[in-house]
Image (spheres, rainbow, N blue to C red):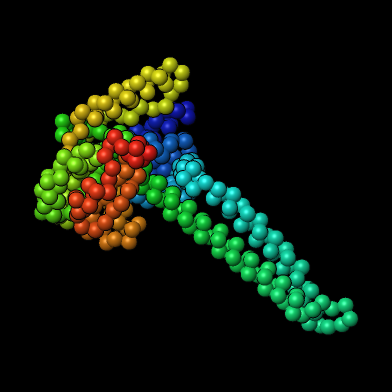
Amino acid sequence: MNPNFDEAQAAYYNKACCHASREEPAKAAQALQTALRDYNVKFHVILNDPDLAPFRASPEFKALQDEARKGGEDTGSSFRRDLKLISEVQAPFRGVRKFFYVAFTIAAGIATFITVPRLIRALQGGEDAPSVTETAQNLAIDLAGIVAFVSLFIWDSKKEETQMSQITRNETLSRLPVRLGTGRIVEVVQLRGITRPVILAGTKESIKGALEKAERYRKDLLQRGVLLIPVEWRKKDETPKKKGFGRSVKAPAAGSGSDDFQKRAQDAALKAVLESEKRFVAEVVSQAEWERWIFEQQESEGVTGGEEVFIVLRLDGRIRKSGRGMPEWQELVKELPVLDSMMSKLER
């Protein structure tokens, strides 16, 4: 049997889905590594596929995602290239800055290479010997330039890695599923532009108290598009319940020509449906995936995993603010503009 490229690609990917459904994350990760490295499977497919939801809640997925973000040999570099493009859009001219850092470092290195022999001649003395003081100053300036530009390059590279990590977490968040009040299951990305999700993570008692307080400001919060998403921490000895994902509404893919118009019309219709179906509180689907994302976000913010936290999202899906404990609803009402305001339109 000699499968062609497409058949082998599908075989490895379906093998990973089978291992994920059997809760064998190590084998699923191995199959996905092969699919990513050798058969050009895009990482966003792994992020979106509901069949891989059990795998995405595992430590093996985090390791695979980190490897793909770094562009490792086992996963290929396509995911990292996509992240770098998004990073460049969010932080323009970083690539230009890094180019000049390298260019100036090389120039300072060449100047140092020329200045060192001059300093040696100056120390040896003689009629044509240059000034020791002036040459030493020039060498100090060249060395300081090398140190400064190398430091700036390292600093900008670290900022880029931090930003790509955040972009990865934002992408993961956008694909997390919730169940609306009507029972419809959607991904967070499909709520962009119509809601400001507020994630409440903590114990059952603390979340219950926060929801009761939020009821006092229900009308004001709804005017601002707030959708509460409570995530109750599971007990350590509690195993997650297996839930079906139902029939989630997929975000439309990009197309061309008349298909583009039709899909944009479908997207607008879906937004209208979701607008009418959204309620004040949504239920998380795939508890383990939500918990893993929150733990990663806490780690990035220097917060101990498992602490009670709240996370407020913008209309465009990015994180607006976060903090320990539960939010002060009155302050949140004052801070958030109503949905039909100009500030909200700019936020979309």
Frontmost residue, 67 versus 335: 335
Residue at 65% x, 61% y is: 105
Left/right of residue 153 with respect to residue 189 in the rendered view: right
Rendered image quadrant of residue 254:
top left
What is the x, y in percent for residue 40?
Answer: 47, 36
Rendered image quadrant of residue 104:
bottom right
Q: Is residue 244 above or below residue 328?
A: above
Left/right of residue 157 with respect to residue 9 in the rendered view: right
Residue at 11% x, 52% y is: 209
Q: Is residue 159 above or below residue 343?
A: below
What is the x, y in percent for residue 341?
Answer: 31, 37
> Which quadrant, please, contains the N terminus?
top left
Q: Is residue 164 above or below residue 222?
A: below
Left/right of residue 60 with respect to residue 211 in the rendered view: right
> Which quadrant, please, contains the C terminus?
top left
Rendered image quadrant of residue 48:
top left
What is the x, y in percent for residue 149?
Answer: 60, 62
What is the x, y in percent for residue 29?
Answer: 36, 44
Judge whether residue 291 can be spotted in this image. no
Left/right of residue 129 with respect to residue 326 in the rendered view: right
Name, please, the residue furthest toward the right: 127
Residue at 58% x, 53% y is: 98
Frontmost residue, 16 versus 58: 58
